[in-house]
Image (tube, rainbow, N blue to C red):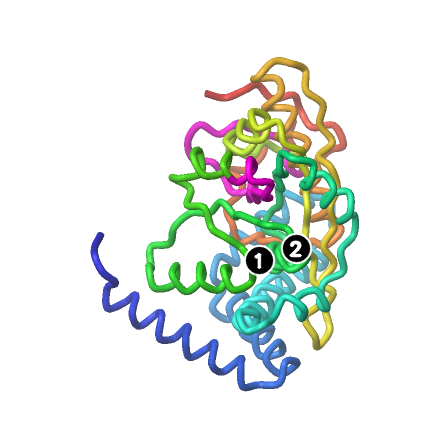
Amino acid sequence: MSGPTPRHRIEYLAFRGARWATSVLPEHSALNAGTTFGRAVGSAVRFRRADVDQHLVWAFPDADPAWRHHVARASYAHLGREAAVLLRAGRWTAAEVRARTRMVGFEPFREAAAAGRGAVLLTGHLGNWEMGGAAIAAHGLGLDVVGKGMSNRLFQEDLFAARARLGMRVIAMGDASREAPRSLAAGRVVALLGDQRAHRGGIPVPFFGRPASTARGPALFALRSGAPVFVAFCVAEGGGTARYTVTFEPLAFASAGDTDTDVLAFLRAYNAALEAAVRASPEQYFWQHRRWKEAPTSTERNTGNPPELPLAG
């Protein structure tokens, strides 16, 4: 493996400088600075702003354009604020993480995970998913997060070390088929983010009433494991202090006994749970990600009854 490039080193030095700056500022000042930076990225730099605006039109076609504009701007402010939180959070103790997180539905989740088969936890790019994982670990559950590597290895090593300090272990995507079952067998929680667009082998599953290519891997893993499956989302409460509400609920899914049917039903249930959570806090979703490939047809618009979609190869 080649070493870091000069660009990677410059990026990492800028990251270290930002982390130092947020650590010396009072918390409310650091969060305000992050919010201001995020707004600038969305309004002045306009990084992926056209994508965000289009995604909000597709997701909320009947909404007032002024409301969609507000959500777009707020989504960038949210990302900046939560980036500032994460720059500071690596120094927090488990007790401090617990003090900052309100856990809703956690006891049934804890009991299910302790029943002997561990638990599979599905989440998405909503709120602050890193703080959600930290909260679970801080409340005493072993947590392993399946994630992709990063092109900048300096960033990756730093991020993985920060997760470890907060009580999370990272399973590389390439090792998941071997390591994730071992984690469940040891009674740990395996966390997966399933809302990135699958470029290969994805299944078109309704998300805001239109097909989104969704990876089948999390569904296959969860179904084969036999472990209880929950969805959880960590939503920021706002204000000058970083505080969060983390909600847990069992995935509303029942097996039909056929793999293809079960995978599609599982992913539909996951996307439905994620959509409901996003509708409750739309400004905290990662609209910058290109979740959909193209514009919907007239029959795929956002309605209460999304079309039936076949399994894709």
Rounded to the nearest angstrom, the CA distance separating label 1 from label 2 is 16 Å
Secondary structure category for the residue under label 2 = loop
Mark 1 is on which residue type?
Glu
Mark 2 is on which residue type?
Gly
Location of residue 283 (image quadrant)? bottom right
In the image, is 220 to the left or to the right of 13?
Answer: right
Secondary structure category for the residue under label 1 = helix
- Give the residues drawn in magenta, as a range: 183-208
**Numbered tag placed on residue 140 in the rendering:** 2
Residue 21 vs 93, above or below: the answer is below
User: Does the magenta segment cover residue 237?
Assistant: no
Location of residue 59 (image quadrant)? top right
Is residue 72 at least partly visible in the picture?
Answer: no
Is residue 288 at least partly visible in the picture?
Answer: yes
Q: Looking at the image, which residue is at 23% across and 64% down? A: 5
Nearest to viewer (mark 1 / mark 2): 2
